[in-house]
Amino acid sequence: MGKLGLPLLFAVITVAFAAIAIDALYAGRWVITIAAGGLAFWMGSFAWGGLRRFRR
């Protein structure tokens, strides 16, 4: 996979944390929603940064 492997891994982790946040939102668990949403945002920034470096 080369340079694309790490951004792809971070993208998958981002989707997983976003799914956890959405599920926790529907379950009424606000603390989990905020934490998982923050982690999804953080991992998403890693994925985006890796993809930007890959495109250069």
Image (tube, rainbow, N blue to C red):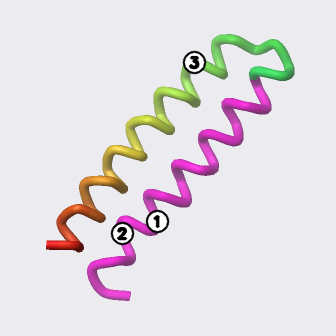
In this rendered view, identify the residue nearer to me: 15 or 52.
52
Q: Residue at image x 43%, y 58%? A: 10
Q: In the rendered image, which residue does mark 2 sit on?
A: 6
Which secondary structure is most common in the magenta stretch?
Answer: helix
> For the residue carrying disc 2, how many other residues have a C-alpha within 10 Å: few (<14), some (14-19), or many (20+)?
some
Identify which residue, 54 or 21, lies in the foreground. 54
Look at label 1 and name its amino acid.
Answer: Leu
Q: Residue 9 bears which disc, if any?
A: 1
Q: Position of residue 20 (x, y in %)?
A: 70, 37
User: Crowding at label 3, few (<14), some or many (≥20) Cα neighbours within 10 Å?
Assistant: some
Dot 3 falls on a residue whose secondary structure is helix
Q: Amino acid at mark 2?
A: Leu
Question: What residue sits 65% from the left and 21% below the top?
Answer: 33
Residue at the spot 79% in from the left edge and 32% down from the top edge: 23
Q: What residue range appears in magenta?
A: 1-24
Decide which of tag 2 and tag 3 comes sooner along the chain.
Answer: 2
